[in-house]
Amino acid sequence: MGSEASARGLLVVMSAPSGAGKGTLRRALLDRRRDIVFCPSVTTRKPRPGEIPGGDYLFVSEDEFERKVRAGELIEWARVYDHLYGTPGAALESLLDGGYTVLVEKDVQGAKALRSRYPDAVYVFVLPPSFEELKKRVERRGTESPGEVGVRLQSYAEELRQVGHYDYVIVNDDLDTAERKLEAIITAERCRVSRNLGRLDVAAKEAEAAGVLSTSGRVDEKGRF
Ligand code: ADP
Ligand code: 5GP
């Protein structure tokens, strides 16, 4: 284990009821932190005004999406609100191998699918301060028809039931406060013993070389040597 385990990046999976502000939160944090990256999903949804192709999503046709599914390029995918969304496996793996902290945004089914593949990832649920405020935010965003807004608000209760599957909840009331909470979660998770085995290995070897410690030669996944 040792150094390879700690060189791997941290995966942060974020879910939220549509309109709670997870995209806004993610953009605010990424503007400040160059060591944190976003791995965009592939979708058949059309870009919203201001969304950057390749930045927010990889926008593709239904045919191209189906080709990716057949080619095994998506490690999970789902139909959400009439559009297809999926996680490109190669892009995600290459960012994690690069040691980055990688944010992804998934619906509750996508987060569940990733949980079995990435049990070490951190799962964060973003809540709106109230249902009233959620409704206002979706309507103010103005990117969905009244019918689509209705469908999204209807899903809220079902999504709330899934919060127990997540590790952390952030209430996105004041944006700055929510951003600081997300940053604090990432900082704490990066300090876990299990993510710092490489550093422990170096410290143990150094102490051994100095003659003050004798080890079994390797650090295990709990940091024992
Ligand atoms: P999501 O990605 O969760 O669907 P968005 O990031 O698109 O949500 O945000 C939905 C709307 O709410 C946007 O118009 C955004 O500007 C607004 N918004 C997001 N966070 C806040 C906040 N903390 N306070 C007020 N408005 C917010
Ligand atoms: P939106 O269209 O509002 O950007 O996203 C709709 C929903 O699809 C959100 O809950 C978002 O998190 C989710 N979503 C985005 N990408 C993926 C993905 O790759 N897989 C799954 N399962 N859900 C996704």
Image: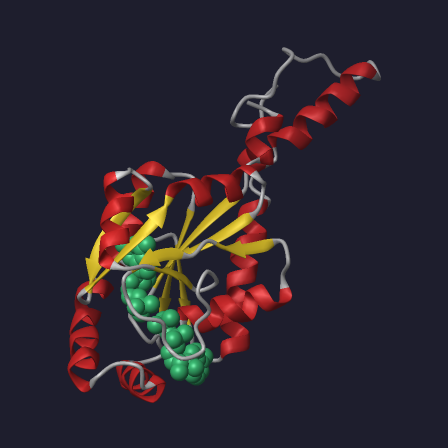
Q: Can residue 165 be seen in this view?
A: no
Left or right: residue 213 compared with residue 75: right
Quadrant showing the C terminus: top right
Left or right: residue 208 compared with residue 192: right
Of residue 82 and residue 31, the one placed in the foreground of this image is 82
Ligand 1 resides in the quarter of the picture at bottom left
Q: What residue is rendered at 27% in x and 59% in y?
A: 61
Identify the colour scheme used.
secondary structure
Location of residue 160 by image quarter: bottom left
Q: What residue is rendered at 59% in x and 53% in y?
A: 187
Relative image position of residue 68 (x, y in whole percent): 29, 45
Relative image position of residue 223 (x, y in whole percent): 58, 27
| Total count of labels | 0
Relative image position of residue 208 (x, y in whole percent): 77, 16
Q: What residue is rendered at 33% in x and 76% in y?
A: 19
Q: Which residue lies furthest to the right in this view?
A: 210
Q: Is residue 151 visible?
A: yes
Of residue 204 and residue 74, the one placed in the foreground of this image is 74
Relative image position of residue 190 (x, y in whole percent): 57, 46
Q: Is residue 156 above or below residue 71?
A: below
Q: Is residue 95 above or below residue 157?
A: above
Left or right: residue 222 compared with residue 118: right
Q: Is residue 62 above or below residue 134?
A: above
Q: In this view, does 216 lie above or below 28?
A: above
Of residue 65 and residue 133, the one placed in the foreground of this image is 65
Quadrant showing the N terminus: top right
